Image (tube, rainbow, N blue to C red):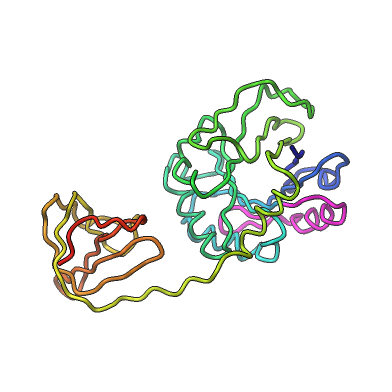
Amino acid sequence: MLKMVDVYSDSPRSFATQSGVNVVMVKATQGTNYVNPYCDKDYQAAKKAGKLLGFYHYVGGGDPKAEAKFFYKNTKNYIGEAVPAVDWESNQNSSWGNTNYVRRFVDEFHKLSGVWPLIYVQASSISQVANCSKDCGLWVASYPSMNWKSWKIPNMKVNTSPWPTYTVWQFTGDNMDRSIVNTTAAGWKKLAKESSKATPKKKSSWVKKSGTFVLGQALKLHESPHIDSPAIAKLPKGSKIEYDATLQGPLRLWLRQPRSKGTYGYIVGKDKYGKALGKLK
């Protein structure tokens, strides 16, 4: 395992080059208007000292896509070299408790960068980010006490479910944020370089196609073709939707229903696994 320390503006600058530490994770941004003024200073110092690198965004709780874009805009030169992470905590986070916020953030960041970020969260609140477990690594915070203050690994069980294990475990958070990384140096570099395997996705476009969709289960009719958009109605199994166009998005097949005054409703015809949710006629 590797030793990791995370640093922010109030950390001693020496933390970024500390002897015996393998990985330095630097706070980059918060919300949509804060950039850590010491971010690049610490990043470049750690790089010069031969450390493995990471950078993170502290969630402020505003629009998740806007925060992901802000994070990417201010850190895109680190992509491919350092591992990104999103910090999900209750303090200064107006969306704490929202179980879909981080999912929307990581989806947007991945769309921009091709990399899935790690997710930092306290062990007792993993349920808030559990829907990211198939894509993102877990950076879990779980302390034996607030007075540990050493690199000795605590002998304690750490909750990671639904993740089978952690990628990073932060076990102190008092005088220094100490973590251990559950991979090798090569493994860490691989996490950073996933973007090199990403291929740009073709922009999806609507295809004019008329038909009838018979719901095979209860589904929501949405205001826009996004799974998190507000629902116009929840339709029961067996309902029929007349559609005039289809859209194969990155994950789902959407059907467009013409409505009054030139408006539309949108419903999922096939889920993210390609499974039809009814009969297309």
Can you say whether 162 is above or below 106 in the image?
above
Q: Give 249 or 183, whichever is nearer the viewer.
A: 183
Above-or-below relation of 84 to 255: above
Percent x, y for residue 245? 23, 74
Q: Residue at x 63, y 41 (%)?
A: 167
Between residue 265 and residue 253, name the one nearer to us: 253
Q: Residue at x 28, y 77 (%)?
A: 207
Q: Quadrant of the N terminus?
A: top right
What residue is drawn where x is 28% and y is 65%?
Answer: 254
Query: Per the image, is 119 magenta?
Result: no
Vertical position of residue 55 compared to residue 79: above or below: above
Please state the horizontal and vertical placement of residue 274, each as a whole percent of the image.
33, 58
Judged left or right of residue 219, residue 55 is: right
16 relative position to 137: left or right: right
Q: Residue at x 58, y 58 (%)?
A: 115
Q: Which residues are magenta?
A: 28-53
Q: Answer left or right for 223 relative to 52.
A: left
- Please tell me which residue lies in front, 245 or 196: 196
